[in-house]
Amino acid sequence: MSTSSRNPIQRLQNMERSRIGLYIVLLFGIVFYLFPMETAVMTMFKTQQAFAQTVPFAPPTGDGFTLAALQTAWNTLRPGLVNSMLMAIPATILSALLGSLTAYGLTTLDWRGQVGVVVLIIAGIFIPYQAVLVPLSQFWYQILPDILNGFVNTVFGFYTNGNWVYPSRNGNVQLVQLSITHAAYGLPMCTLLFRSYYKGISDEMIEAARLDGATAFSIYKNIILPLSLPMFAVTLIYQFTQVYNDLLFALVLVNEPSAQVATQRLTALTGGVVQSFNTTMAGAIVAALPTLLVYVFFGEQFAKGVAE
């Protein structure tokens, strides 16, 4: 009997034990990581009574099935999802682009004080969020408004009648402040990722371009930037995840209800004395969808960028 005609049991018996063990470990890992997600999805579609009477991972049946929790979560989080996108996408692109330019200047260009700047950038990665909350809020709500008010009223006072006021409490301005803050805070990590990547680029290619008369900007535009696409995929996915999932900076910088991001809106679903677990799970899944979709659609590019 040929190998192709053997039944699955015979083929399984002829497999190496190590491969079977590997499959078992992989299957266990898949179940281990997906089990909380399955539990959240099942809870999302249950009524409160069904959740209390069944195990969390069991699917809803009969009258225990409902879409009310999902609808409530969507209606609550929808404005926050839009605000999160408006804030996270510019912050992600800006931090990745500035990180690439900074790493290029710290890797392929030689100038005095380069090592010191690298040390400062690396040190910026280890600064905890909690350490910058007070100076950050003072900068956005006190220092910067005073500087801009003084500058505009002094230089352009004939246009503003000397009473222009920085709109520090405006919701759109708060989203801009939050986006700039995340871009600045993510710059050290993006720079470090690009710098390690640029270390592997051939020096001979860059030297040949310089001998041909190429400027530093043209080398970056025509050589470095096209080669950086895999690392851009890595930094964009990483930075978007960090920015989108942040809550601490949002709580400090955003106090207008119309400007609240998804993570702030999510806290409104946690409830008070009586916890609505189905609504909470539905909100968590809805809030996680953007980052989940990013990894689903761009996971291959992320893996290639990390491998290179």
Image (spheres, grey):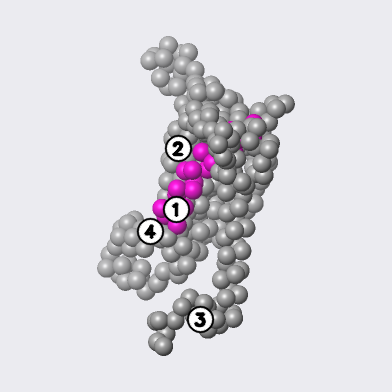
* Among the two numbered marks 1 and 2 on one chain, the one whose residue lies closer to the N terminus: 2
Characterize the magenta stretch by its predominant secondary structure: helix
Q: Amino acid at mark 3?
A: Gln
How far separated are the C-alphas under marks 2 and 4?
22 Å
**Which residue is identified by label 3?**
10
Give the mark toward the camera: 3 or 2.
3
**Which residue is identified by label 4?**
229
Looking at the picture, does residue 120 appear above or below residue 46? Answer: below
> In x, y percent, where is residue 250?
58, 33
Give the mark toward the camera: 4 or 3.
3
Residue at 41 percent of width and 88 percent of height: 1
Residue at 41 percent of width and 53 percent of height: 297
The segment highlighted magenta reads: 276-299
User: Is disc 4 in contact with disc 3, using a CB cutoff of under 8 Å?
Assistant: no
Tag on residue 85?
Answer: 2
Q: Amino acid at mark 4?
A: Leu
Tag on residue 296?
Answer: 1
Give the mark toward the camera: 4 or 1.
1
- Callout 3 crowding tier (Cα within 10 Å): few <14, some 14–19, many ≥20: few
Residue 86 in sight in this render: yes
Relative depth, front residue between 277 and 158: 277
Residue at 51 percent of width and 59 percent of height: 193
How far separated are the C-alphas under marks 4 and 1?
18 Å
Left or right of 54 on screen, residue 306? left
User: Image quarter for residue 266?
Assistant: top right
Q: Is 278 part of what is drawn in magenta?
A: yes
Q: Amino acid at mark 2?
A: Met
Q: Is 280 part of what is drawn in magenta?
A: yes
Looking at the picture, does residue 54 appear above or below residue 225? Answer: above
How far separated are the C-alphas under marks 1 and 2?
17 Å
